[in-house]
Image: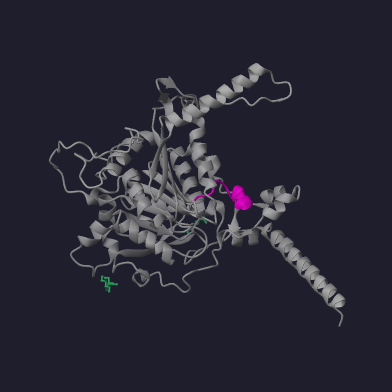
Amino acid sequence: MSTDIAGSGILTKARTALTIAGGLYALALGLIAVPYFQSHTLYLNAVRLPWFADFDAPERYGLALNKTYNFKIQTVDNETLGAWFILSESVYQALPSHNVMPKSHIAHALRARPTILFFHGNAATRAFKVRIQHYTAFSSRLNANVLAVDYRGFADSTGSPSEEGLVRDARAAYEWLINSGAKGEDIIIMGHSLGTGVGARLAAQLSKEELAYRGIVLLSPFSSITELVKTYSVMGALPLVKPLTMIPYAFNFITWALIHKFDTLSVVPQIKGKVLIAHAENDWDIPYTHSEVLFNAFLEPLLPNVDIPSDPVSTTKEDWSAFTAQIAARKTQRENLVTTTRLPNFGVMEEFVDRGGESLVNGEPVRGAEYWAAGRPGGGAPWDREVIFVKMLEGNHDNVGIQEGLQDIIGKKFGLLSHTRPNLPLPIMSAPPMSAPASIAPESDVGGSDLSEAGGWSPLPSASERGEWTGEITKVID
Ligand SMILES: *[C@@H]1O[C@H](CO)[C@@H](O)[C@H](O)[C@H]1NC(C)=O
Ligand SMILES: *[C@@H]1O[C@H](CO)[C@@H](O)[C@H](O)[C@H]1NC(C)=O
């Protein structure tokens, strides 16, 4: 056999392989355009990890004995959802015996401690290992009750998933908490990955109906599924749709075919509670730029407009200088509004307070006033919306919520750390406050005082730090 023939044989094989790969890729994309397959690709609800889970035995998966109540939640459209209610640590440890089913303590737990309403990401079930680690940390370190639900079509829940369906499931879980005795102001909505799309839509819905919730935490969120499809890559290696973006119209087709949009970006203006966004720089599933886009969307209404010259050729010198002045004003405004705190070896925290109807920056009213006024016919009471973005060095896609650094920020911002403090009254200490990072704005009292107290108590914890409801967000929701 001559080398010549062998060479062309390899070429032919390579070409065949490429053709097959190309064909499979086209087929896969074609299938994704079919709702049934799209649904399964997005939700991955058929991946029921851990397989054959016994939801009646949460102890098997790492939770303390009789700390978790396994039950079913009914939705308005008659789906039945599998759910776990996990008791907060202080309630659990105060029980005279752990040989009692946790059901009987739920009403008490809901009155005693705030509750994290947790919406998990795609694939697997509420018993999945990393999710259990979240419940353990939230119930122990943050001493919160946790309600974890499996959406329709997941785990032991009935039905099949859809965007509207998942939002109804989220609402059913919220209603269950209220009907079991929780106050809206004591409910913290938390979503991870796909769950951020669900949680954000629930928060927007509650805000619209003027129903209370303490705030929302978005762990490793995406801005919208359409954006995600453009940037999503499997384990950071295989860009799913990137090759398509090189073919004109093909991307529009995929966008059109996407029936599950979970457009968190578009509901941003409607979310009125406190918002905390957390994302790791080493998230190879969803790039952290999605969180930057979301944070900027919350900030946008507070920044001055920039009129981009429509025709650069005929733009006069004066137009250009007006344009650059606008950009400079925008930059200054951003710097005035956003407080940045560097947390060594952990990440960076950016935050601002949107003062709704009466935003003043250095004595000047900002555009937000008009923006919110327009969205609130009749004016309404002014309210504050605090928005926090924590960009973390580590945590990849799944472990952001189990980083203690982030848990503590959540604890401080959402008033969950009362159990780490002695009971009142505390002696008023005259010692100077521990050196607070200069960059922390005085109004971010919770973050400011807590971050600074590396070894001592701050003189008196505020009501919100003690975990008491201060009525702050009630104003927000009004
Ligand atoms: C739900 O079930 C009840 C009783 O089985 C029935 O009366 C009701 O019409 C059902 N609702 C829907 C939306 O299917
Ligand atoms: C929980 O309490 C019940 C008694 O109400 C008991 O029968 C059961 O064994 C307990 N479960 C565990 C895991 O300890």
Q: Is residue 315 above or below residue 63?
A: above
Q: Quadrant of ligand 2?
A: bottom left
The residue nearer to you, when weighing 257 against 290, is: 290
* Residue in view at x 51 percent, y 60 percent: 152
Give the left or right position of residue 256, taking residue 170 as reference: right
Which residue extends farthest top? 318
Q: Position of residue 390 (x, y in %)?
A: 43, 46
Q: Position of residue 339 (x, y in %)?
A: 40, 35
Q: Main secondary structure of the magenta part?
A: helix
The residue nearer to you, when weighing 360 against 182, is: 360
* Residue in view at x 27 percent, y 45 percent: 467
Q: Position of residue 145 (x, y in %)?
A: 32, 55
Q: Is residue 109 above or below residue 307?
A: below
Q: Position of residue 253 (x, y in %)?
A: 72, 50
Q: Is residue 472 above or below residue 160?
A: above
Give the left or right position of residue 222, taking residue 452 as reference: right
Instruction: Look at the image and give the residue range highlighted in magenta.
Output: 221-231
* Residue in view at x 52 percent, y 27 percent: 330
Q: Quadrant of the N terminus?
A: bottom right
